Amino acid sequence: MPPPSANILILVANLPVPADRRVWQEACALAQNGYTVHIICPRTKGFKKFYDQQNNIHVYRFWQPFEGVGLGGFICEYTTLFLSTFLLGLYLQCRHRLRIVQICNPPDLFFIIAWLLKQFGASVVYDQHDVCPELYASKFTRKPRFFSKITAFMFWLEKQTYRCADRVIVPNESFHHVAQTRGKIDPQKIFIVRHTPDSFFPAACHHKNNTYTSQPPVIGYVGILGSQDGGARLIEIARLLKEKKPALPFKMIIVGDGPELAQVKHNVLKFNLASTVIFKGFVSGDELISAYRSFDIAIIPDAKNTYTDLITLNKTLEYIAMNIPFVYPPLTQTICDAENAGLCAENDSVEALCAALIHLIDHHDVRECLKQNAIKRLDDLAWHHSKNNLLACYHSLVAPH
């Protein structure tokens, strides 16, 4: 068990907690094992209270006036979050003696705050959610000369974050390789902590068994609607499916929000799909479970690039956890994560994804096989394996030497 003074500070930029499932699971695991956890994160719709407390977890949410679109928007957004996090971090350091600071990316800016807190004796854990250089390169494909300089700056920020870290936790084997090669981190200081859902998701057997005999199939997507997430490709796939199977009265449910939402909705109207595509917006908790249970088949629309090839997609693990047959493009890490729990398309084109989708719609036996495979795969990816790695990482920092 950690000493009574083991106060931990977790810095999160992208999502509020507990909506950020990965961070919430980590916080719960640490709190259950004797740590006092403080979290600084943004305040958004549904999570507007400045302060929340549950057992040994204390959540502080800062005001974020807008979500950045374009380079200027991202600079303004990240300046706001950095200053807010910096001031709250200093406040918590003054009130509590912080033993460990966990910095979650993106962006790779929190190393500056972490360096400061290190001067007060805190150790630093780098929770690498994303590979930021590849992430920003995937977002900004125009003006390659200019954005190549931005990408180089992202590599520098990542390098500084690695240098600041006493331990690194990563979501998969691809990130482990990046930390070891690009970050020059000792492999014994890298711990794989996957995104796998814990008890928040019900047992797989609770999912419905729809054979489409009495109602149209429901094709679902859960995720962020951003330029790098394939939101626009979802509508292209729906349009193609309408063309190839005009007699099939399917529905497509999109759960999520993001900077590309307006464009995605525009494309729905453009292709006359308003009666087919349903937008649920950002949901969590029981509403998210209800949305998942309405899916017959799920889809991962992300295009293949240097970023998507490395990352573990939350939706992959959640589709597996909810026992939903799904189709996905041949992304290197997604193939490793899904194994035979989903159907991999021949390539990452919308035509290939649509063809894989049609194959699942037409073959009930394949869908049932994928469901059985998902149950087995979930055992391999179970959260308790990652939980043990997380605790080993933290115990290595607080254990007496």
Image (cartoon, rainbow, N blue to C red):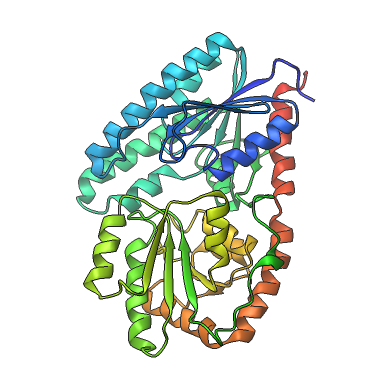
Measured from the top left, where is residue 274 in percent x and y? 30, 71
Residue 160: where, in percent of width, then height?
45, 29
Query: Which residue is located at x 47 percent, y 29 percent?
Result: 49
Q: Position of residue 222 (x, y in %)?
A: 47, 59
Q: Is residue 119 visible?
A: no
How many numbered markers are drawn?
0
Instruction: Please give the name of the residue rendered at 30% of the width and 55% of the height, measured from the top-left corner.
Output: 260
**Residue located farthest toward the bottom when viewing the structure as drawn:** 247
Q: In the depicted view, which residue is nearer to us: 184 or 336?
A: 336
Q: Is residue 250 above or below residue 398?
A: below
Q: Quadrant of residue 166?
A: top right
Residue nearer the viewer, 331 or 370: 370
Quarter placement of the N terminus: top right
State which quarter of the image contains the C terminus. Answer: top right
- Asked whether residue 387 is in view, the answer is yes
Please determine whether, in this image, residue 211 is positioned above or below residue 160: below
Relative to 337, is 209 above or below? below
- Identify which residue is drawn at 37% across, 38% down: 154
| Residue at the right extreme of this rendering | 1
Identify the image quadrant of residue 397. top right
**Residue 78 image position (x, y, % from top left):** 34, 32
Would you place residue 79 above or below residue 269 in this image? Answer: above
